[in-house]
Image (cartoon, rainbow, N blue to C red):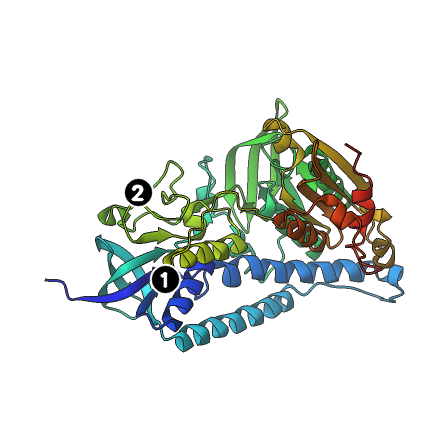
Amino acid sequence: MLNIENYENLVIGSGAGGKLMTWTLAREGRRTALVERGPLGGACPNVACLPSKNMIWSAKGISLARRGMEFGLKTESLGVDIPAVQRRKRLMVENLQEIHLDLTTASGAELFRGEARFVGPRIVEVALHGGGRKTISGDRVFLDLGSRAAIPQIPGLAEAAPLTHVELLDLDRLTAHLIVLGGGYVGLELSQAFRRFGSRVTVIQASPQLAEREDPDVGAALLELFDAEGIEVLLGTKVRRVEGRCGQRILVHADAKEKNRTIEGTDILVATGRAANTQALGLELSDVQLNEHGDVRVNERLETTCENIWALGDCAGSPHFTHVAEDDFRLVHANLSGGNRTTNGRLVPFCMFTDPELARVGKNEVEARREGIEYRLAKMPIAQVLRTKTAAEPRGFMKVLVAKNSDEILGFAAFGFEASEQMAAMQTAMLGHLPYTTLRDTIFTHPTMSEGLNELLAGVPAR
């Protein structure tokens, strides 16, 4: 008979939602167990968001140094030390790991490091990393399983041992010619960074524009940026076959605009999407169902098909952002305390950390037209904001969608210097259901990027 140790709360996975649920419930005095197979904190602080932004910032520093004469900096020679870039990133990651361990210990939660697999309803067997097995159960179970880079079924690709963002962010060498499959957030951020480190970069995108879910003017602006930085972009290109071995020689055979083309490089990065880590966990033994995408099937309260089991973050099909997973935690925790929060109507912001940034919240023009929503549009070059002149960062634009028959802000997008900071102000106004005229007439500090909102909103056509 199994020797089962029971906890009031069992959390599987320590990503953004899982760690916050663990720490909060344990601090409330509830007996809580956390199972984690990898580094504490999940992907974001270890192999994804924060490490990538750390290296992107290094790449920006290198880019600014190359523009040194523009800012009055005299340099006789410049070089890039990739091991030094990695040391800076790894020191940050090590510090974050220490913080996560300290917070987990201080919370009073019990940590089990190992692979969890369900063996019954709300019961898991953990294959401990140090050896041995432990069977534990939870009156309530919270799944924060995360996701991984999906490798498309392209002949020869798996055999080429392709890089995902995890491996690329840990290289101690500079890729000579990096071929990037995918023109979404991950592919574009890392393409620009490694080009600035000194790699030759080719981006292959199957759709006819970069960032295919954004408006055409956004895709065009990104294409112009990449062209200016010497990044080759192949749009409308479908990969048929891959030959070779990553780190040595890679041949990508593709169909580009009804022509066959072969691209030769040294390394290949796969950035074509993500898949939830829901396989081989025995979830069916707890009556937890998956949807057609392989995500855990949840309702608007993030409840699974099994009573007293919830799913958070990527594995629940939530938008793949740390800030959304954190809100998943807030939602579920509030409902445990008698609340009635749902995922319906959440206003989710997006930010791509290219340089300059792309930031968006609410509807874009493509979505509004598809949904039959009539709107008024105001758009202006970001160079009209005087702050960009002090920073010598004139590239980009910003635009806002306002309802046709009211002053409701429907959406905002900005591609430019510190775009994410402008977006935060706009998002706050949208959450507060403020008319666009409130921001239009706000006194913003000069010279900041936020004061550009005054001029942008002054351009909204009258009703």
- Image-based side of 363 in relation to 391, left or right: left
Q: Give how far across and how far down residue 283 sits, in percent.
A: 28, 48
The amino acid beneath tag 2 is Gln
- Residue beneath the point at 29% across and 46% down: 288
Q: Give how far across and how far down residue 356 sits, in percent.
A: 73, 51
**Distance of mark 1 from mark 2, alpha carbons?**
22 Å
Of labels 1 and 2, earlier in sequence is 1
Q: Quadrant of the N terminus?
A: bottom left
- Image-based side of 125 in relation to 401, left or right: left
- Residue beneath the point at 48% across and 44% down: 160
Image quadrant in which you'd find residue 70 = bottom right
Q: Which mark is residue 241?
A: none
What residue did someone put label 1 on? 37
- Residue beneath the point at 25% across and 54% down: 118
Q: Which mark is residue 289?
A: 2
The amino acid beneath tag 1 is Arg
